Amino acid sequence: MLSLIETLTGFAAIMLMLSLLVKTLTSVIKNQWDYYSDNLRHEVQRSAFEVTGKAWNTLLQNAPEWAKNISWERLGDEFLTPAYMSWFLKQLDQNARVFDLESRLKIHVANVKYTFEMRMKNLALAVGLALCLLGNINAFTIWKSL
């Protein structure tokens, strides 16, 4: 009975360490390739196209210099507020007719968050599977070795 408890404890400890390792590796990969900023930039560009009917590159031709040099890595979804986006779109195109922006932006924010969460889940699964396959780690092997 005591050996079973020790085996279960060891098994749980190993599984927790593997989980921590997978989360750490996923975090390192996530920080290396910034999916969130890419998704945010894409949704802002889509929103600008929906409102103005012009492509992003066309809007940037006459835009102020600061708009061309936006550091997307430093922005979060707080960038997609109705007040700020209304002002931002007017800076890009003086003729932009901004209406019903709040409900549109809710859809864009939801897209950013959903895409990011799904990519992170897929990345965590891929990292976990790769780690287990490369290290020949599985529950049966761990249980047998304990």
Image: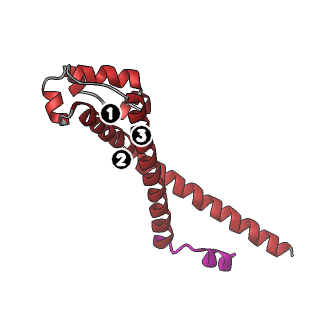
Label 2 or label 1, whichever comes before in sequence order = 2
Magenta residues, start to end: 134-146
**Which type of secondary structure does the marked residue at label 1 adopt?**
helix
- Considering only vertical position in the picture, is 55 above or below 61? below
Q: Which mark is residue 107?
A: 3
Q: Which residue is mark 1?
A: 72
**Which type of secondary structure does the marked residue at label 3 adopt?**
helix
Within-10-Å neighbours for mark 1: few <14, some 14–19, many 20+: some
| Tag 1: amino acid | Trp
The main secondary structure of the magenta stretch is helix
- Considering only vertical position in the picture, is 143 above or below 25? below
Q: Position of residue 33 (x, y in %)?
A: 35, 47
Kindly report which numbered mark, 3 or 2, lies closer to the viewer in this rendering: 3
Q: Quadrant of the N terminus?
A: bottom right
Question: Is 141 within the magenta?
Answer: yes
Question: Is 61 within the magenta?
Answer: no
Q: Which mark is residue 33?
A: 2
Q: Is residue 15 left or right of residue 120?
A: right
- Mark 3 vs mark 2, CA separation in Å: 24 Å
Q: Residue at x 45, y 53 (%)?
A: 118
| Tag 3: amino acid | Ile
Of the pair 24 and 68, the residue shown nearer to us:
68
